[in-house]
Image (tube, rainbow, N blue to C red):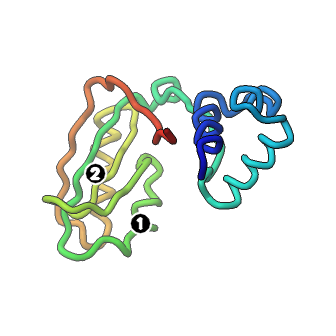
Amino acid sequence: MDDVDRALIVELQRDAAQAYAALGKAVGLSAGAAHDRVRKLRERGVIRRTTVEVDPAALGRGLLAFVMVDSSAWMGAATESFAAIPEIQEAHVIAGTAPVLVKVRTATTEQLQDVLRRLYAIEGVSGTQATVVLETFFERPVRAD
């Protein structure tokens, strides 16, 4: 990946809906060359997907919590069980005091409590510790530069 590829990624992260002509102009390429490079970045898996960033509160998911999940067994094989809970946005096997960290978005603390109940139903889960976010200062994507 060279500097032009990195510049393309930065531009796409800023506005993934821009035309290839504008994208190419921003990085010093023709529209066709920009399109070809973006296609190759997708084929190599550098660009995994193109998506829309949505305000979670506008969709009724304003409560954000990070939950440490304790277990009595290795949880790496429980991927499908975690993925079956739609309020879980991310699940990570981690090194630390608990083997799994999940990011949860709900509308209310009652709904968060329901998610915690469903986590306890996953085989091997022995405990949870939830941290509710009061305010998010910022979030950012992985930078290419």
Of residues 25 and 91, the one drawn nearer to the viewer in this rendering: 25
Q: Name the residue under label 2.
A: 116
Marker count (numbered): 2
- SS category of the residue bearing label 1: helix
> Percent position (x, y) of residue 31?
84, 35
Q: Which residue is drawn at 18% across and 65% down?
A: 126
Label 1 or label 2, whichever comes before in sequence order: 1
| 116 horizontally vs 129: left or right | right
Left of 69 or right of it: where is 104?
right
Callout 1, which amino acid?
Answer: Ser
Residue at the spot x=47%, y=38% of the render? Answer: 141
Q: Distance between the residues labelled 1 and 2?
A: 13 Å
Residue topped by disc 1:
81
Q: Which mark is residue 52?
A: none
Percent from the top left, x then y, of residue 69? 23, 58
**Tag 2: residue type?**
Leu
Q: What SS does tag 2 mark?
A: helix
Image point 47% across, 60% down: which residue? 84
> Is residue 62 shown left or right of residue 51?
left
Callout 1 environment at 10 Å: few (<14), some (14 to 19), or many (20+)?
some
Kindly identify the residue that appears in the image at 65 percent across and 61 percent down.
Answer: 44
Q: Which residue lies furthest to the left in this view?
A: 97
Residue 143 screen position, x and y as percent: 47, 39
Q: Where is residue 78 in the image (x, y as percent from the top left)?
A: 37, 71
In the picture, residue 17 is in which quadrant?
Answer: top right
